[in-house]
Image (cartoon, helix red, strand yellow):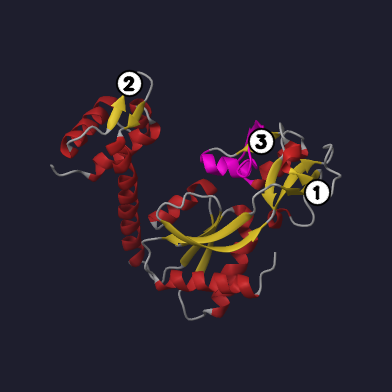
């Protein structure tokens, strides 16, 4: 087998993810013929076909699927190693702890408590990040620790569960079931439910309440955060499901949070890159687990 360039593996991953040479070339900023030559050279080096090409799409062979999984992990490892090497040269860098905007209360409490109880250690810094970039930022080493809601892409990550809580249905105030004290998920069959762009099949099933049992539903508006969800619920454009702690005792005006049976619970994880070796990360994870166990009540 000839030497394989890391760039070839990145090209292959892009084609396998896009399932189309034109889209992959555009994503990589190169021409399609150059990409095709690079993939052909990679297949020659490996010695087996990696992609099946037809007029509809491009898909990995059995060997290609194995290489795809391994190549993604390798690329993540290289990016993380470079990022950590650069950060090692910084003066007294902070431990960067990240969460989505809707988890700001938990993030703020944990970071403040950590810095108070560990005054002689590298301080923690709270970082709010787009949920779609969060797992990549952890794998790349751009941030050290993250608070993530299950399900999430845990490839290359380790995590511990901080807590599990029930989810509720978010309904417009004028909804026929809004006055109920409790409902069943099956009673919401056929409703329009907001979607989240870029989510996996498992994530979509969770956020539409179809992960425990199948239910009919209609795709609603594509959203980016919880504020957009509550705004669209208030306007009766969609319903949604949310962790109880993110709604609280007083949901926004025009929105009713109704306890709902038949929904899976919501698990908040503290996560970090599986390749991370920093004692500061281990210290923060232990602190988060102890802080939640002793102080936090949901």
**For the point 52% across and 39% down, which residue is it?**
201
**For the point 77% across and 40% down, which residue is it?**
234
**Rendering quarter of residue 191:** top right
Marks 2 and 3 sit apart, C-alpha to C-alpha, by 35 Å
Classed neighbour count for the residue bearing mark 2: other residues with Cα under 10 Å, few (<14), some (14–19), many (≥20): few
Q: Tell me which numbered mark, 1 or 2, is placed earlier along the sequence.
A: 2
Q: Nearer the viewer, residue 9 or 32?
A: 9
Outermost residue toward the bottom? Answer: 120
The N terminus is located in which quarter?
A: top left
Coordinates of residue 165 in the picture (x, y in percent): 67, 58
**Rendering quarter of residue 84:** bottom left
- Whether the residues at callouts 2 and 3 have beta carbons within 8 Å, the answer is no
* Magenta region: 198-225
Instruction: Report the side of 260 relative to 283 (left or right).
Output: right
Q: Tell me which numbered mark, 2 or 3, is placed earlier along the sequence.
A: 2
Q: Does the stretch in magenta take in 31?
A: no
* Foreground disc of the pair 2, 3: 3
Disc 3 target residue = 215
Q: Secondary structure at mark 2?
A: loop
> Does any portion of residue 146 appear in the rendered image?
yes
Disc 1 target residue = 182
Task: Determine whether 238 is above or below 276 in the image.
Answer: above
Q: Tell me which numbered mark, 1 or 3, is placed earlier along the sequence.
A: 1
Disc 2 target residue = 54
Marks 1 and 2 sit apart, C-alpha to C-alpha, by 51 Å
Outermost residue toward the top? Answer: 55
């Amino acid at each position: 087998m000839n030497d394989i360039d890391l760039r070839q593996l990145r090209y292959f991953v892009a084609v396998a993810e896009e399932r189309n040479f034109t889209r992959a070339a555009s994503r990589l900023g190169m021409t399609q013929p150059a990409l095709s030559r690079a993939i052909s050279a990679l297949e020659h080096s490996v010695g087996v076909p990696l992609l099946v090409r037809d007029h509809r799409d491009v898909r990995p062979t059995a060997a290609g699927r194995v290489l795809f999984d391994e190549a993604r992990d390798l690329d993540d490892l290289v990016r993380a190693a470079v990022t950590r090497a650069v950060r090692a040269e910084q003066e007294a860098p902070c431990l960067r702890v990240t969460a989505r905007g809707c988890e700001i209360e938990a993030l703020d409490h944990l970071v403040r408590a950590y810095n108070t109880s560990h005054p002689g250690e590298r301080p923690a810094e709270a970082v709010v990040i787009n949920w779609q970039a969060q797992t990549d930022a952890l794998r790349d080493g751009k941030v050290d620790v993250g608070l993530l809601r299950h399900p999430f892409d845990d490839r290359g990550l380790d995590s511990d569960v901080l807590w599990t809580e029930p989810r509720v249905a978010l309904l417009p105030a004028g909804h026929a079931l809004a006055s109920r004290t409790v409902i069943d998920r099956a009673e919401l069959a056929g409703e329009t439910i907001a979607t989240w762009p870029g989510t996996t099949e498992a994530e979509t099933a969770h956020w539409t309440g179809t992960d425990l049992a199948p239910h009919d539903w209609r795709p609603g508006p594509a959203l980016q955060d919880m504020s957009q969800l509550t705004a669209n619920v208030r306007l009766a454009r969609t319903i949604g499901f949310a962790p109880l702690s993110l709604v609280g005792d007083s949901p926004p005006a025009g929105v009713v949070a109704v306890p709902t049976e038949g929904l899976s619970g919501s698990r908040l994880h503290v996560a970090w890159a599986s390749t991370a070796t920093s004692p500061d990360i281990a210290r923060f994870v232990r602190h988060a687990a102890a802080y939640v166990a002793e102080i936090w009540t949901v």
